[in-house]
Amino acid sequence: MPEAYEFDITVIGAGPSGFAAAMRAWDFGKKVCLIERGRLGGAGVHNGALSSKTMWELSRDYRNATRRDRGFSATGVTVHYEAVCEAVRMATDAKVGHMTRQLRELAAPLPGHTGSITLVRGHARFLDAHTVTVEDHETGESRRVSSSHFVIASGSRPRQLPNIEVDGEVILNSDHIESLSRFPRSLVILGAGVVGCEYATIFANFGQTKVYLIDRAERILPFEDVDVSRLCSNNLERKGVTIHHRASLISMRRVDDEVEYTIEHAGGGRETIRVDRALISVGREPAASGLELAAAGVQLNPQGQLVVDDTQTSVPHIYAAGDVTLDIALVSIGEIEGRHAVERICGATTRTLSYDNLSTIMFLDPEVAAIGINEQEAQKRRIPYRVAVYGYALVNRAIAMRATDGFVKLLVTDDDDMRILGVRALGVHASTTIEGVSLMIHANRSVRDLAELLHPHPAVTEGLQDCVRMLLGTSIHKPEVFRNELRLSRVTFSDAGEPTR
């Protein structure tokens, strides 16, 4: 008979959403069990958010070090893939260290606090709606955990394609990137979404790898506006990346120690190319198999995904958060969902989680920060809007950094209130530009509230401020003069639904 434990709240998965859920449960003085079968942090730390962004930062540092337009020329600059991966591991180890320290300190109740968190290693599977068994395949130990409530936060894994064998050596997914012993001589990336484009940017920045990107759509990042997609695409191609636009993959297979792939172009012609390595980046799928959810009565949809309503599953005391729900696969959203699930369990909130002020960062060239809707979405919904676009070429901080590639785009409602609909910022420090906008969208505030904020100077946020002033007709730089750098438009819709400017 396995050893038994009883808890108030059991969290399955110690990635961003699970760890946040466990800590929020501790806030409420609960006795918490946190189950993890792999490494603390999940894909939010390893083979994902933190690791890939660390690699992006390193690649950008290397590219800047080899530039010749900054008044100096560095010589003898070398880069080795194993050293890059070691720097990435140092970053992830630091994060895991923070998590480990906190779990160690909170394993027993602190003075004046009833909460505790017990970390249990192993694979969890439900025996019934209130019980899981946890099997540690390394030690062979088995434990039974009973709990009043559960939060499923088991994350996601790279999606597999049935006709491509990912061997982790020559044909890879994002879990295998750090296992390479050297920079590939050439690399084909299947998938031109955010992750695929990020890795294309990373390897192009290091300049050691010829990169090919297979994109079946007309343009990369098809969910973003054309001007955003075009700038990122042009920059990739300037770095030597070959983008197979509107190409269908016919086959991909390992041949000895290389990869051979065949694509069919939009015009009908086929092309076969041999490369050193391949990276499959076609999305992620929930890591819920093996949990035996049926034993707990948790309902799944026909695609095998959890049915979730505001983090609550079909079983009232079982919740789910983060990538396992496969709604929005972002660390920040996973953390918020984990916290929200616990707050609902503890009766601390009755509000429904809102995603209207969702913000994202895409680590491309240039960096892309996004919040709210874009022009493409506004037109799809037939929302009349006004838009101001302010080029980084006129932003003093960008000028000082010699990094004027990019722009800030601000969408507001086409009425006297001019409420913020969305912002897109492309360029250095782009994520800084949208920090204050999230709260304003959440509070449904007018863009006028941003007009007279006192920004530090020089700062990239001044570009957003001047977007506001353009909409109010009070900008320092005039769109009538800087026609290539500035844009001011008003988009309405005809009776037939066509946008008019």
Image (cartoon, rainbow, N blue to C red):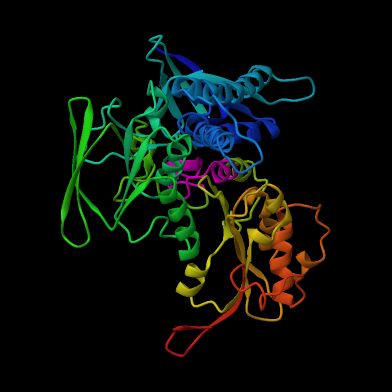
Inspect the magenta stretch and tell me whether residue 332 lies in it: yes
**Is 428 left or right of 173, judged from the image as shown?**
right
Mark count: 0
Q: Quadrant of residue 474?
A: bottom right
Inspect the magenta stretch and tell me whether residue 165 lies in it: no
Q: Position of residue 189 (x, y in %)?
A: 33, 42
The front one of 30 and 310 is 310
Over which residues does the magenta segment extend?
A: 311-337
Q: Is residue 377 above or below residue 291?
A: below
**Is 263 left or right of 457, judged from the image as shown?**
left
- Name the quadrant of the C terminus: bottom right
Q: Position of residue 447 (x, y in %)?
A: 72, 69
Report if residue 126 is visible in the image: no
Q: Position of residue 334 (x, y in %)?
A: 54, 42
The front one of 264 and 323 is 264
Name which residue lies at 16% across and 60% down: 268
Name of the residue lying farthest toward the top: 139
Name of the residue lying farthest toward the bottom: 495
